Image (cartoon, rainbow, N blue to C red):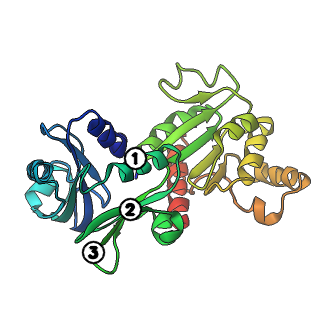
Amino acid sequence: MTDIIDLPGLALEWHRAGRGVAVATVVQTWGSAPRAVGSQLVIDADGAMEGSVSGGCVEGAVITEALEALADGKPRVLEFGVSDDEAFAVGLACGGEIKVLVEPVGSALPVEVLERLVDARGRSEPVAYVTDLEAGGPRLAAQSAYPDRFRLDRSGVEEDGKTFVAIHNPPLRMIIVGAVHIAQHLVTMARACGYAPTLIDPRGAFGSEARFPGEVIMDDWPDEAMAILKPDARTAVVTLTHDPKLDDPAIIAALGSDVFYLGCLGSTRTHVKRVARLEEAGFSAEQIGRIHAPVGLDLGGRQPAEIAVSIMAEVTQALRKAL
């Protein structure tokens, strides 16, 4: 899950502050539900809330039930139908149904389980939160227990109809080598698609705050930056400089990692030369075959923003095929 706010962490923080907290989680959806399975809402005893389970359609009812759960210490599973009119108000074409689990922290959701969940998320460790919707008793499970769910990044109810599994994967990242015009558009698109982008460019004139306000920019040499960032299977790497002295070290580092996507800007002729350099460096045809080059889907675009769109489209395609 990729919440902008760390909602499990916030729930723990509020609990430790003595505020009384319940966590509401979407466990099932049918039709055009406003929020995905796994989406969460944190509510305190005064009705303060963070997060969302429906984009505003049923939050009021969930808060009321959460306050009652805090009073009796018992979990509850709520079912709501979202009308077409309510769905339209939050940007959907038609309505649907959602099932929401409400768990008061300290009783239905033991503090020690929440602490372990928050700790695992803080260490970017994949972890599943598992509970019985009928009997309760939440626990954490490793990636090996639900490999398909982790691979698909998909929370949901198991075939038994009562075991809910919430997948907490590390966040998606995009490492962009080369703070060029395309990157100015790509960082925005990446963030909108749920990635945490990082720019690498040792050239101060390119990787400046003025050109990329508020962005994470590393001015290290690419191989040094990649060693610090430690790209993994939840990481996409895009090289945009056209300069082998900058692109190649990043490419070599990416090929030595589990990144799910590696795309490199440049013409077909440029890539032929790149392949020759990598072969000389000892990389096999299979390893080199992981590179998407020329980068991006062939949409026919030529402007920087259009190229960024094609890159983001190809990254999305690679992610969904990899998941």
Q: Find residue 33 and report its horizontal and vertical position in percent.
A: 22, 61
Residue type indicated by callout 2: Arg
Residue type indicated by callout 3: Lys
| Residue at the spot 57% in from the left edge and 36% down from the top edge | 198
| Residue at the spot 54% in from the left edge and 54% down from the top edge | 315
Q: Find residue 11 and report its horizontal and vertical position in percent.
A: 30, 42
As helix, strand or loop, the secondary structure at mark 3 comes to: loop
Q: In whole angstroms, how far apart are the C-alphas of marks 1 and 2?
A: 11 Å
Q: Find residue 306 and report its horizontal and vertical position in percent.
A: 50, 45
Question: In the image, is 239 to the left or to the right of 303?
Answer: right
Mark 1: give few (<14), some (14-19) or many (20+) Cα within 10 Å. some
As helix, strand or loop, the secondary structure at mark 1 comes to: helix
Instruction: Give the numbered dot on residue 162.
Output: 3
Question: In the image, is 72 to the left or to the right of 240?
Answer: left
As helix, strand or loop, the secondary structure at mark 2 comes to: strand
Is residue 323 visible to us here?
no
In primary-sequence order, the first of circles 1 and 2 is 1
Give yes or no for contact between labels 2 and 3 (Cβ–Cβ under 8 Å): no
Residue type indicated by callout 1: Glu
Is residue 116 visible to us here?
yes
Above or below, 111 against 36 in this view is above
Q: Mark 1 points at which residue?
A: 115
In primary-sequence order, the first of circles 2 and 3 is 2
Q: Mark 2 points at which residue?
A: 139
Instruction: Give the numbered dot on residue 107.
Output: none
| Residue at the spot 10% in from the left edge and 55% down from the top edge | 86
Q: Residue 245 sits in which quadrant?
A: top right
Above or below, 116 against 167 in this view is above
